[in-house]
Amino acid sequence: MEAYLTLILFGGFLVLLVLGAPITVSLAGASMAAYLILDKNPIALVQIAFTSVGNFPLMALPSFVLAGALMEASGISRRLVDIAENMAGPVTGGLGAATVFACLFFGAISGSGPATTAAVGMLMIPAMVKREYEASYASAVTAASGGLGIIIPPSIPIVIFGISAMGLMAPPEAISLHGEFDTVSIPKLFIAGVVPGLIMATTLILTNYYISKRRGYKGLMESWSLPDINHSLRRGVWSILAPFLILGGIYSGIFTPTESAVVAIFYSLFVGFFLHKELKFKNVLKSLTTTTWITGRVLLILFAATVFGRLLIEQRIPVHVADALLSVTDNMYLVWALTIMLLLFIGMFMETLAAIMIIVPVLLPIMYMLGADPTHVGIVVICTLSIGFATPPLGENIFVASGIGGSSVEQITSRIHPFVFASVLGVFVIAFFPQLTLWLPSLVGS
């Protein structure tokens, strides 16, 4: 029966996707078919979907989306870009490096890949073209760097992973083999993402330096200018304080991740209206509209994915998948390699949040059986799926960068593959050396 139901769930899901159905319809349709075959009451499907949004941590989702939109409208992102440009200075390919740094900074207040690409790209792509960078290359650097937005905390996908993983306990078989596992928490996931995020950024900076040296893309200036750096730092002091306020409040225990998102909203409004004086009422309305659209889309996917995942767990499909895989190999490195390749493939075709909600119920039991730390698993999943923003055919960041820079999707894709390969290498390093992820949480006692 399990094999038959697995075919119904995944087969129905893939068939509906191929037919062009939205991912929400594909998940819900496959789940409904399984419910009818199991002779379950379809009303239960609606009840599970409704209950899925009664999760307190989930309130962080619309709040972080709104905070990111308000920070962009209030001039915070532009000041972060100015700081990044002055810090890059005379370094070969300095503007490309500045783009990576700017995405790193903005990712610490956005939590979204496309939002990071849009906010930084509107400023950096024209600046690079003006300095004689090829337009398609400028767009490629920005699209590849935008994925950092979901790794550097606070991150919307990390919140979704945390919610999904907290409902999955380690199987008794795994506990008997490896002992008790550390609990999953969103604050711990947030702090665990810092070092991997820096590793991923480093791979992009090194790739940009190598390509820029070959193409003769010079730095922004002849030498570093301390007055310019000091000026940009003074001008952007409130922008720099934003991630420290958000993350500092979480890690010090002053407020939860959900509460920190609300604090970020009020901080953005205060800075935009009273300090930078750039935020207008019409921009607030636009930010609210953007938040409503993004949140509504994500919640619809969450409804359907929760039911889909519940069916997988009830029928013990993840356990059977784990047993099948472990009967082939129990080598952790080989399992990680297979997992990363699978996630890269999924990221090319599926939205990140939907992929997380579908993958977690299947992947996490396998990793528990191998003794992997769930926090480490979550960060590797997020880092791998972040590459999907820069890989077609979905490649949301590529489309955003194309719209900003004017280069075609094909032109950007032809320039982005070195960054994709470098990012994949970074993911393998993070996966094979879990201490890189778990060192910082252990240091702060998370």
Image (cartoon, rainbow, N blue to C red):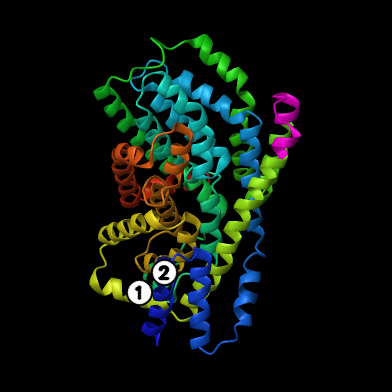
Q: Main secondary structure of the magenta part?
A: helix
The residue singled out by tag 1 in the image is 321
How far from the left and from the top, in percent, is residue 275? 72, 24
- The disc, 2 or 1, on the residue closer to the chain's N-terminal end is 1
Q: Please determine whether, in this image, residue 68 is positioned above or below residue 215.
A: below
Q: Is residue 212 left or right of residue 234?
A: left
Q: Quadrant of residue 241?
A: top right
Quick check: 215 left or right of 39? left
Q: How far across and down, in percent of the image, does residue 395 sit? A: 41, 48
Q: Nearest the camera: 401 or 264? A: 401
Label 1 neighbour load within 10 Å: few <14, some 14-19, many 20+: some
Give the distance between the C-alpha atoms of the residues marked 2 and 1, in whole angstroms: 7 Å
How many neighbours does mark 2 have within 10 angstroms: few (below 14), some (14-19), or many (20 or more)?
Answer: many
Instruction: Report the disc number at residue 362.
Output: 2
Residue 254 appearing in the image? no
* Type of amino acid under label 2: Val
Q: Are marks 2 and 1 in contact (CB under 8 Å)?
A: yes
Could you say which is closer to the camera, residue 70 or residue 104? Answer: 70
Q: Residue at x 35, y 38 (%)?
A: 412
Residue at image point 51% right, 30% down: 122
Magenta stretch: give its range: 271-284
Q: Is residue 324 visible?
A: yes
Q: Residue at x 41, y 55 (%)?
A: 381
Which corner quadrant of the image does residue 390 belong to?
A: top left
186 versus 304 height, above or below: above
Task: Residue type at mark 1: give it.
Answer: Val
> Is label 2 in a helix, a strand or a loop?
helix
Residue 85 location in percent, x, y? Answer: 47, 21
